[in-house]
Amino acid sequence: MVLEPQKLKQLFEEYGVWPSKSKGQNFLIDQVVLEKIVQAAGLQPDNNVLEIGPGFGILTEELIKRAQKVLGIELDKRLVYFLKQKFKHEKKLEILQTDILKIKNSELYDKLTKGQGSYKLVANLPYNITGAVLRKFLVYEPKPEAIILLLQKEVAQRIIAQPGKMSLLALSVQFYGQPQIIDYVSQESFYPKPKVESAILKITVKNIYNLEVLMEKKFWQLAKIGFSSPRKQLQNNLSAGLSIAKESLKNSLKLAGLRPDCRAQDLNLDQWISLTKNLMT
């Protein structure tokens, strides 16, 4: 069960832990939202779960009930102490004090699964590390089979964007998986109350585009150049960034089925890949 604000305040005082506004740390106090996060994870008795930033273990409690094993990664040593006391008799849980961005995925995977099977990532992340965490677990192996995050509403909406509103972030996430917003979460669901609304985002991680190494490298080079000045036409960005004549680029755009005046945000993933192939031939 979630903790009431008054109980949280008592724990803050007792353990000397205070939420950091600069890091976007907010504690969930809404039981309905908690249940939606757990439901989105679709946990089975044989599932392994990596939880980032368990805090006072509210979400952790629910994960333990449903999963085979839970590995909680917590940076704050005071919270680690609290968690180890709270769950000292819980054999399905391991708490590790470390920076999630500094530990290798392979080390986490071995601790969680002993090198076998799959795992899911579930977290109520500090908003300032959302991008870094997504990159870490979408790009580098071993990847989770699913990622369920409570994150800033605006970021979630950017991630699921469609052509016309695409961004490098949307392209990056959609290249590696299928994102969907499960539900939106109001500021009232947290203590302290954040300035922004949140969302529950689920990413089903899939290797949809198995590009050769050289092709994938070129793909990301084009994407980064293309989004470097989003308001400019794509042909202008690529012409300047790749030192290619505009006429040649217009032909490549045409072969990819794109208008000469299109912008980076207008392209879907398949069109980016088609354009990449045309520019490599």
Image (tube, rainbow, N blue to C red):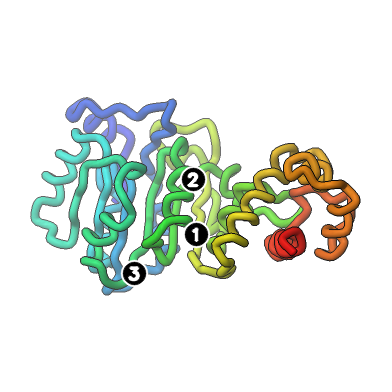
- Which residue bears the numbered disc 1? 202
Label 3 sits on what residue type? Ser
Which residue is pictured at 39% across the width and 46% down the height? 124
Q: Is residue 189 above or below residue 18?
A: below
Mark 3 lies on residue: 118
For the residue marked with disc 2, what is the amino acid? Leu
Which residue position is annotated with label 2?
A: 151
Would residue 195 be found to the left or right of residue 267 on screen?
left
Q: Is residue 157 visible?
A: no
Q: Residue at x 12, y 61 (%)?
A: 91
Q: Secondary structure at mark 3?
A: loop
User: Disc 3 versus disc 1: distance between alpha carbons?
Assistant: 16 Å
Position of the C terminus, as image quadrant, is bottom right
Mark 2 touching mark 3, by CB under 8 A? no
Indicate left or right for 6 with 208 as reference: left
As measured in the structure, the alpha-carbon distance from the residue carrying label 2 to the one carrying label 3 is 23 Å
Q: Earlier in the sequence, mark 2 or mark 3?
A: 3
Q: Quadrant of residue 242?
A: top right
In this view, the residue farthest toward the left is 89
- Residue 259 appears in the picture as rendered: yes
Could you tell me if the residues under marks 3 and 1 are in contact, i.e. CB atoms within 8 Å? Answer: no
Please give the name of the residue rendered at 64% of the width and 55% of the height, measured from the top-left corner: 218
Mark-to-mark CA distance, 1 and 2: 11 Å
